Amino acid sequence: MNISKQDLDLAARDGVISAPQADQLWRKLQERDTGSTKSKFDVANVAYYFGALIVMSAMGWLMNLGWERFGGTAISLLAITYACLFILAGRTLWYQEKLTIPGGLLFTLAVWMTPLAIYGFEQATGIWPQGAPNNFQSYHIWVKGSWIGMEIGTIIASLIALRFVRFPFLTFPIAFSLWYMSMDLTPLLLGKSEFAWHDRLWVSLCFGLLTIVVTYFIDGRTREDYSFWGYLFGVMAFWGGLSLMESGSEWNKLMYCFVNIGLIILAVFLQRRVFVVFGACGVFGYLGHLSYTVFKDSFLFPMALTFLGLAVIYLGVQYQRHRQQFEEIVLGAIPESVRRLRPVER
């Protein structure tokens, strides 16, 4: 719920609270909001995150081969130097200027230097878990067991940073590295460099499911939202592995649709929109399969889908109008032991 000064003034005019209480409450809310790390959709925060993503791209996905000429030792030292500069700048903004969002983003950029520093160290020493890769660019392209050390190091660096700086976006490198690890673990678990595509999909599915479960136990236990990125990458790994599996029978495809409907229901329980997005994509994919394959020449199928879509919209309107009564009925039918499992609404 968003509360403005006008809302408090209206409550004072209606006699709910006094005018001095309204002013005092508004000042207290402003003080709390100043120290919050929650991002708002305004020009400043868009600039903060956009700039951080540019740096992440430059030091990650868009890293060119020019760095390789320096050699492993120089690459590692350069990455450490960048990280130290980011930490110093972030420390100034976070502690002295009280600018938590740009300061937290700079701490995140320092953590983002970890895989590059470890890559340089491994290249200099020749210590690789499963053979030396061609270059750092391959980290974001090829699945390979040699990246495991970089991913573990990034996770450890993020956890250390979170110990000192309570900034939710620091969970992004953790979730990102876990997502990559779900793929890079496959060659190590199978003990070979070459492996079947089906094996990698199963590892991605299981790892994504595990990430969702672990994230659930974190969700709602802290004031700040540290679960967003865990849910996002967990669903991506789970849904991606599931969706790319070949199912030869219509029964398996129907089960796939039911799983995606389950994701949508889970979104309501966990109060997370990311499950709706991926679940809806899966359901639409199944409906597309029915349209192009099963009911290819059917005249009634598009009409039936149209009425179904309109019915869903109508139910949504009715839910919006009678939301409180509907939720009271639904929650009243759920046992108290199950209701306590829901994360706190943010």
Image (tube, helix red, strand yellow):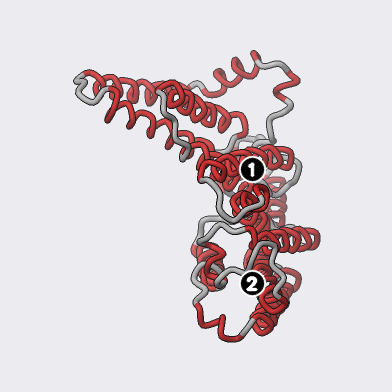
The residue at 51%/60% (across/down) is 42
Indicate the amino acid at tag 2. Leu
The residue tagged 1 is 207
Query: Residue 16 in the image: x percent, y percent?
Result: 66, 35
The residue at 58%/68% (across/down) is 133
Indicate the amino acid at tag 1. Phe
| N-term-proximal mark, 1 vs 2 | 2
Q: Quadrant of residue 211?
A: top right
The residue tagged 2 is 116
| Vertical position of residue 231 compared to residue 131: above or below | above
Quadrant housing the C terminus: top right
Query: Residue 37 in the image: x percent, y percent?
Result: 67, 57
| Vertical position of residue 34 compared to residue 319: above or below | below
**The disc label shown at residue 33, or none:** none
**Local crowd size for mark 1, using a 10 Å CA cut-off: few (<14), some (14–19), many (≥20):** many
Residue 175, visible in the rendered structure: no
